[in-house]
Amino acid sequence: MLAVSRRVTAAVPIGIGRVVARPVLTGAGSVSLLCRYYSKSSKPEPSRSNPFPIDTAHVREKHENAKLSRYQRWAKYLESEKFKKSMTKYYIGGFIAMCISLYYYMRDRYYEDIQLKHVRAKYEADPSSLLEYEYLMMKKLNNERLRPKEEKKWKIYQMMRKEFRRKNLLNKDAIFEPTPEQLDEWYQKQPRISSRKTPVLDQPIDKPDVVDDTKQESDKKTANIVPAEDTTSFYEEKAEAYDNEIKWEERAILMGRRRSWLMSQIQGDVLEVACGTGRNIPYLNTEDINSITFLDSSAKMVELAVKKFQSYYPKFKKVGYTVGKAEDLVDLVKDNKSIQYDTIIETFGLCAHEDPVKALKNMKELLKPGGRIVLLEHGRSTWGFINNHLDFRSEHRMKTWACRWNLDILDLVDSAGLDITYEKRVHLGTTYMLICKRPEDPINQSEKPFINKLFGSAPPKPIEKSK
Ligand SMILES: C[S@@+](CC[C@H](N)C(=O)[O-])C[C@H]1O[C@@H](n2cnc3c(N)ncnc32)[C@H](O)[C@@H]1O
């Protein structure tokens, strides 16, 4: 049987107060009801009869807090007296943390400035003497966008630089001059712990101007990219039906707007590679251009493009048509070296090429200095589940449309040694709107980031690549 003992320790309330009753287990099988008087402050007063009073207000508060959500608990804490009283502590702590980070930041800027002076002097003396790291540094300074592989390398160089600075804490004359081999060595030694921040390079680390085709190969294995093939005969057969079959799909995803964007970027002498039936022709403003040339590997496609152009712009005479492959572009013009273009455009052609990297390299060769390649392409998405679908249906897509729709377009552009000055991805990241340039050409004022446009700066000098 349970023995219940009643012990009332404070019977006479003084002033405003309340009596709290609570059953407490006091020993084996016994329950004692403790009634205790608490003052309004709800702090238990130690009494001679009970040296371990229960802070019931605290317990009640704990129970109430348990019912609240995490955010409500935080809000309650921020409103509480306890928090307000400890604010000074937080202010001082925050201030110290800010001072420490400011010190590290300023120290980093100081050393970076010394390094910059050194690189600038080197560049003035002999631009080709720049190391890869210094070349990337100059590119960053000129507000140029680094290519994806360069960006990864830049991040690794920055990590190396921080380590270098830690090792040379007090030696302000030490200049960080890593070679690509040292980068490779340093990178090999790093523990391979997957972290979102750690850039992962494909092995081996190549020089910026060396094309890494191994990545494409490894991609083919992992991403189920079907082998490339010559799709000319497929499109010869498809030519007549092409427009009718594609028009509803394009209308549904408002592709007209994207084509219109592409055609608003062109100027001067223009070349359209893989023009197909000439689906971009309706968006052309002939006043923006000097001449336009259409190229496609399928003769039937070119025939349809001729008809379309003539029906839209019967009076425009500076137009040319060529049947040929993008991979042979440079050979096609080798007899006339003066053939070069201000703008080269391509829409949804890279997926159909036998060698898209070679095609892009050829376009780069045919660009006038300062010219641009404008691409509207489709490929791998920024979403994993979409890529899974693209990979799963890649063979079917190849059969039905002679199209490798899961290619990484940025990777192709990178492998061709082109810099991207504008990038926009739409349709869940599967449609790429890109403007590319040769690395040796400077970027235009309009391509600079907002702050630069606001305050202006001297037009950047073209950067020469290290040899
Ligand atoms: C999907 S269609 C795109 C056509 C058009 N650019 C458009 O936006 O509708 C692909 C086109 O690329 C052409 N093509 C395929 N391989 C080619 C190559 N190696 N060189 C040039 N054109 C090629 C095909 O003949 C076809 O017209």
Image (tube, rainbow, N blue to C red):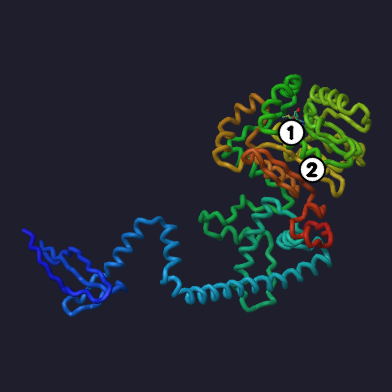
Which residue is found at the position 77% from the left and 28% from the top?
276
Res 99 seen here = yes
- Label 1 residue near ligand 1, CB within 8 Å: no
Along the viewing direction, whichever of 184 and 338 lies nearer the viewer? 338
* Closer to the eye: label 2 or 1: 1
Q: Within the image, what quadrant is residue 122 found in?
A: bottom right
- Label 2 residue near ligand 1, CB within 8 Å: no
Name of the residue lying farthest toward the front: 15
Q: Which residue is the site of mark 2?
A: 373
Above or below, 290 against 417 in this view is: above
Res 366 seen here = no
Tell me: 10 left or right of 421: left
**Which amino acid is tagged 2?**
Ile
Which residue is found at the position 61% from the left and 73% from the top?
102
Residue 256 shows which numbered tag? 1
Q: Position of residue 74 (x, y in %)?
A: 44, 62
